[in-house]
Amino acid sequence: MAHDDQDSRDNDQDDTPWEEAVKRERDEARDDNGDEDEESHDEQDRRREAALPSKAAAVHERLRISGEKELERDAMALLWSAIAAGISMSASMVARGLLHAHVPESDAGFLIESMGYTLGFLIVILARQQLFTENTVTAVLPFMSHPTRGNLGSLMRLWGVVLAGNVLGAGIAAFTFLHLPMFSPEVNDAFVAIGEKVMENDPFSMFSKSIVAGWMIATMVWVMPSADQAKAWVILIMTYVVAIGEFPHIIVGASEILYLVFDGKVSWGDFFLRFGLPTLAGNIIGGTFIFALISHAQIRNDMDVQREGRRGAWGFNRKK
């Protein structure tokens, strides 16, 4: 019996910390009860989180596992989900444009109009579509935990496919809104005004403000696992702050600026050089190199303690 237990432990060396913790709890249950009781998913999740060394580590582990699942998805599945997300994100421009056309131009009107900005995020995140700035946190955590060349390649593949799909979807939506008689002239003028407001930023201002947008969206992703039934409120509050702060977001902004490009008011060069590249760089820095690195650093001590014991064994020093 002892020999079998040792073989089982040897075969589990490559399990993730979460899986290790669950197996340890199950082994203890077998020793105490002689058989493993059926558990609900909620009970299993509580066991897993209880076995982790801190609440921060529990959130980190949940997001890391989510990121690993995304990295393993087929490229075409990612692309179609990303295109759908780009189209869905254009709902932010639509809602904001509709409100802009029907509220007076004032501080109060601006605050009301900004509520429309949240719609695209609500649709995309709750529908679990692939949004680029979400992946600056979830997909980067597996690489931070295990910085190998293979993980870096998988991360770059995911980012490239999702970003391309999001921009393509945003472009399809913007082209459709412009050329089909969907909206009144007042709403179309509102779309133009929204895009022109974004383009008032010079490239450095676009970059600087985009850092805040990336940081806010990354914060939202980190908070979501703890939000339970309040996820919609978390999305609404965090993205509303991005809207009233006028912090550029690469995908929402793509809809707004591509509308101007297709209308002949902005050149492709302006789209890429004044908006696209500075905003993309700012979102990545804010979401990855600031928030994700800091959030990962806070559990590094837990990881170091983990490595002092058996690799991958969260709570390795817990005793019965």
Image: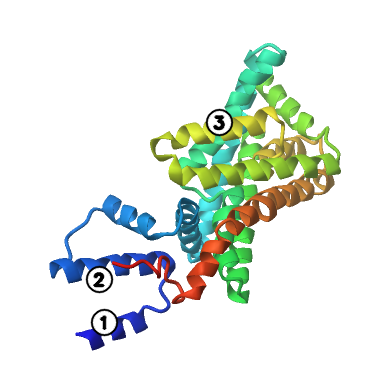
The one of 166 and 116 positioned closer to us in this rendering: 116
Asked if residue 151 shows in the view, the reply is yes
Q: Mark 2 against mark 3, which lies toward the viewer? A: 2
Write the residue at 58% across / 26% down. 116
The one of 183 and 140 positioned closer to us in this rendering: 140
- Disc 2, SS: helix
Whether residue 120 sits left or right of residue 270 in the image: it is left
Residue 282: x and y in percent read: 74, 48
Q: What numbered label is drawn on residue 27?
A: 2
Residue 249: image quadrant is top right
Residue 11: x and y in percent read: 35, 82
Q: Mark 1 against mark 3, which lies toward the viewer? A: 1
Whether residue 201 sits left or right of residue 293 in the image: it is right
Write the residue at 29% across / 50% down. 42
Whether residue 191 sits left or right of residue 270 in the image: it is left
Asked if residue 163 shows in the view, the reply is no
The one of 117 and 14 positioned closer to us in this rendering: 14
Mark 1 residue type: Asp
Find out whether the residues at labels 1 and 3 contact each other: C-beta distance under 8 Å: no
From the image, which quarter does the N terminus lie in? Answer: bottom left
Q: What numbered label is drawn on residue 237?
A: 3
From the image, which quarter does the C terminus lie in? Answer: bottom left
Residue at mark 1: 5
Q: In the picture shown, does residue 221 fall above or below 304?
A: above
Q: CA distance from mark 1 to mark 3?
A: 50 Å
Find out whether the residues at labels 2 and 1 contact each other: C-beta distance under 8 Å: yes
Q: CA distance from mark 2 to mark 3?
A: 43 Å
Residue 114: x and y in percent read: 63, 25
Residue found farthest to the left: 34
Find out whether the residues at labels 2 and 3 contact each other: C-beta distance under 8 Å: no
